[in-house]
Each structure stands twice: as C-alpha cells, then as structure tokens.
Amino acid sequence: MRGDQSGGCCDGSAPMCYSVGEFRVGPQDVLLGLIAGCPFYIGAAQFEYWQHTQLILDVVPGRGAGFSLEAPEGVRFLTRSRIFTHAELGVLATAKPPTRGG
C-alpha cells in the first residue's frame, strides 16, 4: 500500500491509501515517512506549506474518501496538525532534505 496527503480536488485535502501501483509517485512527491511499512507521500507544494507542522494521521468513524482503500470500511483517514516547537525546528534544520519520489 501507499499513502498520500491529497492536495484537494474531489475529496478535499485528505490522506488517502492506495494499493501499490495505483498511485504514481513522481519527482514532485515528497516522502514523509512510513506508516506500518507503507510509504506516505505529500506533494512538493503542500510540503513547502506544511514543513513547519507535524502532521498526525488518524482513523475515525465516518465516510472515507471515494478513491481511498478505507472507503468501504466505515472509517476515514483524518489529518491533525500542530506547529513544531523551536527545538524541533532546530533538529529539522540539521536533517538531510526529504526523499523525493519518481
């Protein structure tokens, strides 16, 4: 599986989950990390906007996004956020640039 923080369109700005091969990753996609061993990406423009924010992915009851694997399960993914502290931003400033897709 692969995850993606959607940038809008039909399903709004929601995290989505796809089977491997159903979501094409390109050089404009930034790897945020792994969730249960599955890569999770965000578009470069969204990454630039959210880079000072910790994104916290959650699963809650409700109608999922139409294109995402959780849709028929009666749950949906939800992104929560908080601004990084000054100390966390200092650590991030010394980190290597994030990996890009494609």
Image: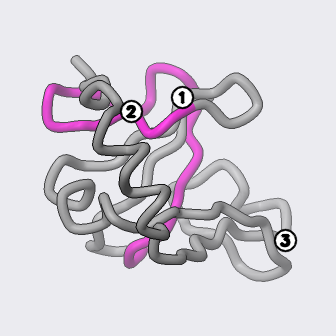
Residues at marks 3 and 2, CA–CA distance in whole angstroms: 27 Å
Q: Is residue 70 above or below residue 84?
A: above
Which residue occupies 47% across, 67% down? Answer: 84
- Residue named by callout 1: 39
Residue 48 in the image: state x and y as whole percent.
Answer: 18, 58
Q: Which mark, residue 31?
A: 2
* Image marks 2 and 1: residues in contact by CB distance under 8 Å: yes
Quarter occupied by the N terminus: top right
Q: Is residue 44 left or right of residue 63?
A: left
Rendered position, 54 above or below 26:
below
Q: Residue at x 24, y 49 (%)?
A: 43
Mark 3 or mark 2, whichever is nearer to me: 2
Whether tag 3 and tag 2 are in contact, CB under 8 A, the answer is no
Name the secondary structure under disc 3: loop
Task: Determine crowd level at label 1: few under 14, some 14-19, many 20+ residues with C-alpha closer than 10 A.
Answer: some
Q: Secondary structure at mark 2?
A: strand
Q: Earlier in the sequence, mark 3 or mark 2?
A: 2
Q: Earlier in the sequence, mark 1 or mark 3?
A: 1
**Residue 18 lies in magenta, yes or no?**
yes
- The reply, left or right, for residue 68 in relation to residue 51 is right
Label 1 sits on what residue type?
Pro
Q: Position of residue 46 (x, y in %)?
A: 24, 61
Highlighted magenta segment, given as a residue range: 11-33
Q: Position of residue 37 (x, y in %)?
A: 70, 23
Q: Amino acid at mark 2?
A: Leu
Label 3 belongs to which residue?
74
In the picture provided, is 54 more to the left or to the right than 58? left
Please indicate whether residue 86 sits to the left or right of residue 18 in the image. left
Mark 1 or mark 3, which is nearer to you? 1
Rendered view: 62 above or below 101: below
